[in-house]
């Protein structure tokens, strides 16, 4: 662990120096104009954050440290016998900024394995909740129960120096990443299976072990988990879960508090919950149309019904992307390889043929193409994971890699408390009427 920390610190110090120069020479450079519409309408397109781990291009999709999803699938080390990249390798890339060697990934996997113990009181806390509790609520309660383990919180209480914030954050981030698969798998068993935690397998990689703890031992499912954990890990800094984790962390709330806050945002239907909404919507469509394999015409009819009821088509659209999400395409490739004749997966592909022209015809949807959530559920159902309310927990486990790496960077770069200015509509009106010179006076 010390070697990894040293490498991270060296990279952070180097970047910190570069940022000092950038700010000294260009700190007053104006990067764009902010319109009233942006302020009222969710700050779309407003560049307002620095996030080092990934960058989203509206046409190309996400790049992690400049590497596309396709490149990651090709270049990142894989588990022995597996075909998909190891999520630990992506974690290394986001933390250190370089594609790791197989040995470097093995080292990180062993660090994670050694930190994976979850105290029994965490499971007891989750068991105290009624069984009907949503899996995301159980999961976040489990994470919060673990918060007493935070190095950052303990060291801060004991008067930690600012220069050590990053190191305490780094320890917490690795502990959390190591432990949350155990918490998440317990949520699955408590809610849907035998109700007991399953012990980790110390010989498996992070995602393979997660599949094992969930009770899925097949090699294909393990590979699906590796792919799933890689593609959901990060989507630059402005999405709700990443931004919330960053914002809460900026108050020096420890990584447990910050990550849990971010995951409460992931649990919203316009964000991470969309993966459960997609499969629920497809199941309802099958029931309504009385067929497992609806035709394109039948799908179009159901899409129009959904829109007429004032609902969104889940899994379609994006606040930044303007093309088919490459994370959707990566899952489609997985489906074509392992389950080309699956009814549900084929329905997802027919929905892909049908929905974009309909959304386009509305004339207001900026992106009629599918996002990551449009596909994931159908692959999970193929392997028997039909409990769709659980899907966002899988997303949350993956998202830990991105938001916690970013939190390490935030503390290492000394990011300050985030506190933008807000105004009232009355103040906007005064300003538009030229009663005041500056908006907010
Ligand atoms: C992701 C999402 C929240 C982005 O929102 P956004 O940035 O405001 O999107 P747009 O600017 O394209 O929205 C413009 C209009 O199109 C509508 N729209 C966008 N996506 C839509 C969809 N999938 N189905 C129906 N209408 C949609 C919006 O609701 C909005 O309508 P309004 O003006 O009547 O309020 C939106 O596309 C959505 O709700 N998608 C479905 C949920 C989903 O898949 N979420 C996961 C995202 S990864």
Image: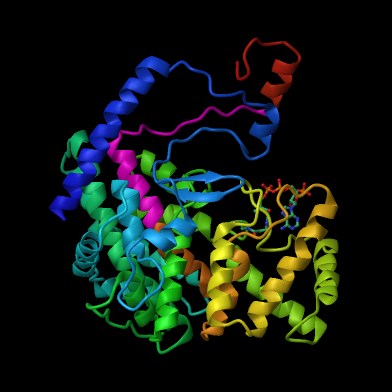
Where is residue 167, by image quadrant? top left
Where is residue 140, by image quadrant? bottom left
Q: How many marks?
A: 0
Does residue 208 show up?
yes
> In the image, is 152 to the left or to the right of 45?
left
Residue 3 position within the rendered picture, expressed as x and y whole percent measured from the top left: 14, 51
> In the image, is 436 to the left or to the right of 55?
right
Write the start and end of the magenta stretch as one range: 401-424
Residue 415 position within the rendered picture, expressed as x and y whole percent measured from the top left: 35, 34
Rendered position, 352 above or below 282: above
Question: In this orientation, which residue lies closer to the viewer: 307 or 251?
Answer: 307
Question: In this orientation, which residue lies closer to the viewer: 144 or 111?
Answer: 111
Q: Farthest residue in the left direction?
A: 2
Work out which quarter of the rendered image holds the C terminus and state it. top right
Picture colour scheme: rainbow
**2 falls in the magenta region:** no
Residue 280 position within the rendered picture, expressed as x and y whole percent measured from the top left: 66, 75
Which residue is pictured at 25% across the width and 50% down the height?
170
Work out which quarter of the rendered image holds the N terminus and state it. bottom left
Which residue is pictured at 68% across the width and 38% down the height?
41
Which residue is pictured at 24% across the width and 42% down the height?
166
**405 falls in the magenta region:** yes
Does residue 153 show up?
no
Q: Farthest residue in the bottom direction?
A: 194
Question: In this orientation, which residue lies closer to the viewer: 421 or 2?
Answer: 2
Rendered position, 217 above or below 227: below
Rendered position, 385 above or below 242: below
Which residue is pictured at 36% across the width and 32% down the height?
416
Rendered position, 53 above or below 289: above
Residue 395 position within the rendered picture, expressed as x and y whole percent measured from the top left: 48, 64
């Amino acid at each position: 662990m010390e070697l990894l920390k040293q490498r991270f610190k060296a990279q952070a110090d180097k970047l910190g120096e570069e940022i000092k120069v950038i700010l000294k020479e260009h700190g007053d450079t104006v990067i764009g104009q902010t319109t009233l519409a942006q302020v009222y309408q969710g700050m779309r397109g407003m560049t307002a954050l620095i996030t080092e781990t990934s960058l989203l291009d509206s046409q190309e999709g996400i790049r992690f440290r400049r590497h596309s999803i396709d490149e990651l699938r090709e270049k990142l080390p894989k588990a022995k016998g597996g075909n998909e990249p190891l999520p630990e390798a992506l974690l290394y890339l986001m933390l250190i900024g370089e594609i790791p060697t197989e040995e470097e990934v093995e080292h990180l996997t062993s660090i994670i394995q050694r930190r994976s113990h979850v105290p029994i009181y965490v499971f007891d806390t989750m068991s105290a909740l009624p069984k009907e509790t949503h899996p995301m609520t159980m999961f976040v309660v489990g994470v919060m129960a673990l918060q007493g383990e935070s190095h950052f919180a303990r060291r801060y209480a004991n008067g930690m120096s600012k220069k050590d914030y990053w190191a305490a954050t780094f320890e917490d981030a690795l502990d959390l990443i190591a432990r949350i698969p155990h918490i998440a798998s317990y949520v699955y068993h408590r809610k849907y299976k035998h109700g007991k935690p399953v012990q980790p397998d110390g010989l498996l990689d992070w995602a393979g072990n997660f599949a094992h703890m969930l009770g899925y031992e097949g090699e294909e499912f393990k590979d699906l988990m590796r792919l799933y954990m890689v593609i959901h890990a990060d989507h630059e800094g402005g999405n709700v879960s990443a931004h919330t984790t960053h914002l809460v962390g900026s108050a020096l709330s420890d990584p447990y508090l910050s990550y849990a806050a971010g995951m409460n945002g992931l649990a919203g239907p316009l964000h991470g919950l969309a993966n459960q909404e997609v499969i629920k919507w497809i199941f309802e469509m099958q029931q309504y149309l009385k067929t497992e394999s609806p035709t394109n015409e039948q799908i179009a009819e159901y899409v129009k019904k959904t829109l007429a009821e004032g609902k969104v088509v889940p899994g379609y659209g994006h606040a930044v992307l303007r093309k088919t999400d490459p994370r959707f395409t990566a899952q489609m490739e997985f489906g074509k390889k392992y389950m080309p004749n699956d009814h549900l997966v084929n329905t997802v592909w027919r929905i892909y043929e049908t929905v974009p022209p309909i959304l386009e015809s509305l004339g207001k949807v900026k992106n009629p193409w599918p996002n990551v959530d449009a596909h994931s559920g159908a692959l999970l159902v193929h392997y028997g994971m039909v409990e769709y309310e659980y899907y966002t927990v899988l997303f949350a486990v993956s998202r830990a890699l991105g938001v916690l790496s970013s939190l390490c960077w935030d503390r290492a770069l000394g990011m300050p408390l985030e506190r933008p200015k807000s105004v009232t509509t009355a103040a906007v009106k005064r300003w538009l009427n030229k009663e005041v010179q500056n908006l907010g006076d």
